[in-house]
Each structure stands twice: as C-alpha cells, then as structure tokens.
C-alpha cells in the first residue's frame, strides 16, 4: 500500500508540475506575441503623422533626418533618426536608409527631417533627395509614402503638395 501511495503522490506531483510548466509556457507565448506583433502608433492620416513627427523633431537645434519604418498595414515598426547635420543641412546616405529599412523588414517608410530655421518649405535639394530615396527604396520593394519637413507650425507633407 505504501508503494501505491508513493506512486499516486509522484503522479500527482508530476501532473502539478506539468500544469505549472504549461502556465509558464502559455505566459511566455503571450509575451512573445506582444513582442513580435505589437506595433507603434497607427498613423492613419497626414495630420496624425505631422503631430507624431513634430513631437519627435521639433526640439532639435540642428538638422536631423529620420525615417518612420512601417509594416505592410502601415503600422509603425520603428522611428529612427539616421543622420545628424548642422544648423542648415544634413548629409543623407541612401545606402544606410535601405539597410535600416531591410533590417526592420519595412514595407513602407515615411521620410522626415527638420528645418531648425523654422521654415518648413522644401528646398530643391529636399525634393531631389526624396525622389532619389523613392527610386532606391523601390528596388527593394519599400514604398515611400511621404516626406515631412518639421519646422514652425504644422509639418509640411510633400505628398499633400503632389511632390511624391
């Protein structure tokens, strides 16, 4: 009888341990889902993008160039400032933008930079850079949805002006 009791206790202990492990595994899977499938804010309109980017770049006292990397449903994967410049320019290297887009497995991007002078009007260099990045990113199937310039007032969307 002692052997039977020990066997029952061992079986109960194993069942309890397995149940506890299953709960831990279930919690780990929930955490994994959150890490893999949780995205940043949904930027569903130019106004929301403008507000988001204003908060990201308005405080900069020198020019910076950043990219919002988006998934196939245009949800934010990541925002990164990729290049830092001086008070009125920043060098942007298309190769680096492509590398970061591929690293994030981005389907689309929104380009952005600030004008510390406050004037959000794009220069010819801004428009040329946008066209070049659009062309280069298209080779790796990443769409450029817009390019915002952050300055005084509402950030300017090149797409809203038909420049993309």
Image (tube, rainbow, N blue to C red):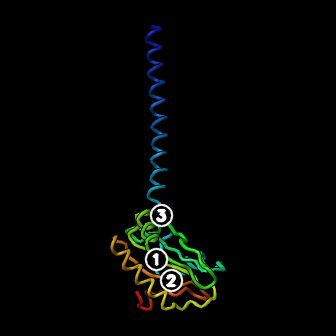
Q: Is residue 154 left or right of residue 109?
A: right
Q: State the image quarter where residue 83 is shown.
A: bottom right
Q: Position of residue 151 (x, y in %)?
A: 60, 86
Q: Where is mark 1, residue-wise?
A: 110
Dot 1 surroundings within 10 Å: few (below 14), some, or many (20 or more)? many
Q: Residue at x 49, y 34 (%)?
A: 20
Cβ–Cβ under 8 Å for marks 1 and 2 = yes
Q: Position of residue 135 (x, y in %)?
A: 36, 79
Residue 51 visible, this angle: no
Q: State the image quarter where residue 141 is shown.
A: bottom left
Along the viewing direction, whichever of 154 and 138 lies nearer the viewer: 138
Which circle, 2 or 3, is nearer the viewer? 2
Disc 1 to disc 2, how far (Cα)?
8 Å
Q: Where is mark 3, residue-wise?
A: 39
Along the viewing direction, whichever of 150 and 127 lies nearer the viewer: 127
Disc 2 to disc 3, how far (Cα)?
21 Å
Residue 74 visible, this angle: yes
Which circle, 3 or 1, is nearer the viewer? 1
Quadrant of the image for the C terminus?
A: bottom left
Element type where label 1 sits in the image: strand
Q: Closer to the N terminus: mark 3 or mark 1?
A: 3
Q: Position of residue 159 (x, y in %)?
A: 43, 86
Q: Is residue 86 above or below residue 19?
A: below
Q: Closer to the N terminus: mark 1 or mark 2?
A: 1
Q: Where is mark 2, residue-wise?
A: 148
């Amino acid at each position: 009888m002692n052997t039977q009791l020990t066997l029952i206790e061992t079986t109960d202990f194993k069942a309890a341990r397995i149940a506890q492990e299953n709960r831990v595994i279930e919690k780990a899977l929930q955490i994994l889902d959150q890490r893999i499938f949780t995205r940043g804010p949904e930027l569903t309109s130019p106004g929301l993008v403008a507000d988001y980017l204003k908060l990201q770049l308005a405080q900069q006292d020198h020019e910076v160039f950043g990219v919002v990397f988006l998934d196939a449903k245009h949800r934010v994967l990541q925002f990164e400032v990729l290049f830092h410049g001086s008070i009125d320019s920043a060098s942007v290297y298309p190769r680096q933008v492509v590398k970061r887009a591929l690293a994030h497995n981005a389907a689309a991007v929104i380009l952005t930079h600030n004008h510390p002078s406050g004037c959000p009007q794009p220069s010819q260099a801004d428009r040329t850079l946008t066209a070049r990045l659009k062309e280069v990113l298209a080779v790796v199937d990443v769409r450029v949805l817009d390019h915002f310039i952050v300055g005084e007032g509402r950030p300017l969307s090149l797409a809203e002006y038909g420049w993309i």
